Each structure stands twice: as C-alpha cells, then as structure tokens.
Amino acid sequence: MKKILITGGAGFIGSHVVRLFVEKYPSYHIFNLDALTYAGNLENLKDIEDKPNYSFVKGDITDKGFINELFNTHKFEGIIHLAAESHVDRSITDPLAFVKTNIIGTVNLLNAAKETWKNDFDNKLFYHVSTDEVYGTLGQTGLFTETTAYDPNSPYSASKASSDHFVRAYGETYGLPYVISNCSNNYGQNQFPEKLIPLFINNIINNKPLPVYGDGNYTRDWLYVKDHALAIDLVFHKGETEETYNIGGFNEWKNIDLVKLLCAQMDKKLGRPNGASEKLITYVKDRPGHDLRYAIDASKINKELGWKPSVTFEQGLEITIDWYLNNENWLNHITSGEYKSYYQKQYS
Ligand code: NAD
Ligand code: TYD
C-alpha cells in the first residue's frame, strides 16, 4: 500500500481532502497528521474514521524529533501539506504562531522528506497547499496568475509566502520533487466560524450583529471546498513537478454583496421575513492592512489538467447553509470554549 501523509487533515479543507483520498484510493493508506489546535476537529471525519486505509496521528509539525521519527517509521511516498495557522485576524494578533507553524513546521516536513527519500526521488512528491494571498492585493482590475510576483501584506500571507519559497528552494537545492497550488477563498461544510461565511451564518442563526469590516467593498474569489479537494487530487496525480497551479472559483464577490445574498438565503431557510437578517449588518473598524481584492486566473489548471468548479456559488452556498442548519451540534461544540474568548477579543 502506498503511504500518503496528509497534514492538517482534521481542519476545514484537509478533512475534505482526507475523505476524498480515503474513499477514492483504497490502495493508498492515508495518514492524517494533525495537532488538533482550536481549528482541528475529528468530528469532521467521523464517517471515515474506521476505514482500514485511514490512520489518525496526533502530532505537531513544529516538533522536529517527532516528525523525523514518524517519517522514519512510515517512509511516506507522498505528502500533501495543509497544516497551518490559517486566519488573517489571528495572524495580526499573534504573528509568531504563524512563523512557527507555517514556516518552521513546513521546513521540518521538507527536511524529513529529504532525509527519508535520500536522493531517491522516483515516484515521490511533496505537495504544498498554499493561498492566493501570497500575491498581495489587486486593484479594481487584473487577475493573479502563476507568474504574479509575491507581495504578501499580512503576517499570515507573509508566512505562507515564506513556506512556498522554502518548498521551491528545496526543489532547486536538493532536487526534492514538489508541486504548489495557490487557491482563493474556500467555503463549505466544516469551516471554522471565524472566517466570513460560517461566522455570519452562525450569527444570523443566533440573531447577532454581522460585523462587516470597513465599507464592505473588499472583493474575494470564492470556491466551494469540495471543488478545491478535487483540484488537489488532480494536481497531486497529474500536475507537473516544480510547477505552481492557481486554483480559483471564477467567482468574485464584494463582501457586502455576498453578505446580502447570504442574508436573503438564510431568511428563506429560517422562514424569516425577507430583509430580517440584513438588519443585522453592522459596519465595524477595518482590518489593518486589509487586501482590497483577490481574483485568480485559473486557466492553467483548467487547460492543462481539465479542472473547473462543479457548482455555482448560489448552489454551493445553499449546500453550505443547509449543512450548518442541520449540524447544530457541530456548531455548538465548536463555538463553546476558546471560540468565546476569541470572539470577545476580536469583536468587542
Ligand atoms: P484550518 O485552520 O481549518 O485547518 C488547519 C489544520 O491544521 C487544523 O486541523 C489544525 O489543527 C492543523 N494544525 C495547525 N497547526 C498545526 C501544527 N503545528 N501541527 C499539526 N497540525 C496543525 O485551515 P484550512 O482553511 O483548512 O486551510 C488548510 C490549508 O489551506 C492551509 O495551509 C491554508 O493556508 C490553505 N488555504 C486555505 C484557504 C481557505 O480559504 N481556507 C484558501 C487557500 C489556501
Ligand atoms: P476571511 O474569511 O477572514 O478570509 P480572508 O481574510 O483570508 O480573505 O475574510 C473574507 C473577507 O471578509 C475579508 O475581506 C475580510 C472580511 N470580513 C469581515 O468583513 N468581517 C469579518 O468578521 C470577517 C471574519 C471577515
């Protein structure tokens, strides 16, 4: 059995990738390595936890000794690296946590892969999952392509940019086979309610204010998480090594327009009068260094690997809302404890 390590598999995107690989590839053994930080949740994988080709390993990618031993024991042939600190607002409060996990953690994994593979790189691959935020911000026009210069603005994007550079440097210096993808904003089932869409769904359910940063005229390109997982599958199996693939939804929304659409869909689902949820919109202090606009040119992955999103934004959003409404327990578990103090600090 081919042993594949997926890091961060208990998180939002990672859990969808783990499920896809466990179910689609019975000849792979999938090891899910996750430290179970506030963002990691094994409830995300309940339906597959007993599958014979799946193992969960609790551990921290910043722990060099532990990582080396894990690689020594299992001699993974492929790595799909998603573990990260992923929220921009938290990176503004605590940049060092992002340096530690996103940079040092990634370098630990690169070293362990290099040592384990010992220059026999045939049929090996280090796949680094990254973000479009490394490119910085766009003005009103233009798109990020794979050749756009890196220009990160937040501690989060700076740490992801740094980890991308390390991955590329290990390819150049040691010949480590790698591939990188840079994706736009994801949404869907199991996203931690600190990010815009699940935070606002949770607040609408609970009739709490919807804190729109600044004037709300910031633009993001949204992609349904399962379409990202399918793109990761394609890049892992068919992507060229030493290449980067941009992944995006061809789906730009100004925050305020997205929030109004979400409010309208939620009013229908909750049987509230049209316009009720919009009344919860509250403009709050802007995020420092807030990137104006992200938008991806995903034509390379489309032309070379035949990938494109499978659902429209309206469809994906409806699936997402239905999931949160039908999984109140998940939301209740997640929003107890640490979430309360985070929310208080961020929004009071
Ligand atoms: P997430 O915050 O939901 O999950 C991150 C996971 O990593 C959690 O399960 C957490 O427990 C784990 N983790 C954190 N620190 C760890 C450590 N030191 N050791 C081991 N595990 C650790 O993140 P996500 O939104 O699923 O993002 C996954 C990856 O995709 C990240 O690398 C992120 O940069 C990238 N990405 C995210 C988006 C997005 O919109 N969410 C878009 C593009 C790229
Ligand atoms: P977010 O989901 O944090 O993703 P990112 O910052 O990585 O793009 O935020 C998406 C957009 O929504 C971003 O422009 C910031 C904005 N936003 C708010 O207006 N209010 C909020 O409470 C949050 C979390 C985000």
Image (cartoon, rainbow, N blue to C red):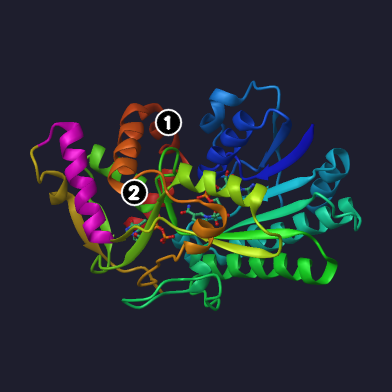
Q: Position of residue 169 (x, y in %)?
A: 75, 71
Q: Is mark 2 within 8 Å of ligand 2?
A: yes
The magenta region covers 254-272
Of 206 and 272, which appears nearest the observer? Answer: 272
Residue 257 is covered by the magenta coloring:
yes
Secondary structure beneath dot 1 equals helix
Rendered-image quarter of ligand 2: bottom left
Quadrant in which the N terminus is drawn: top right
Where residue 34 sits: x, y (%)?
A: 65, 42
Type of amino acid under label 2: Ile
Left or right of 101: which side holds 125?
A: right
Instruction: Write the residue at 90% across / 58% down.
Output: 119
User: Compared to 341, does 183 lie above or below?
Assistant: below
Q: Nearer the viewer, mark 1 or mark 2?
A: 2
Q: Which residue is mark 1?
A: 330
Give the secondary structure at mark 2. Answer: helix
What is the distance, in whole Å, between disc 1 and disc 2 at their CAs? 16 Å
Q: Position of residue 185 (x, y in %)?
A: 43, 56
Is residue 115 visible in the rendered structure shown here? yes
- In the picture shown, does residue 16 fall above or below 279? above
Q: Which residue is mark 2?
A: 197
Q: Would you place residue 209 above or below residue 206 in this image?
A: below
Residue 234 is labelled as: none
Name the kind of residue labelled 1 in the image.
Trp
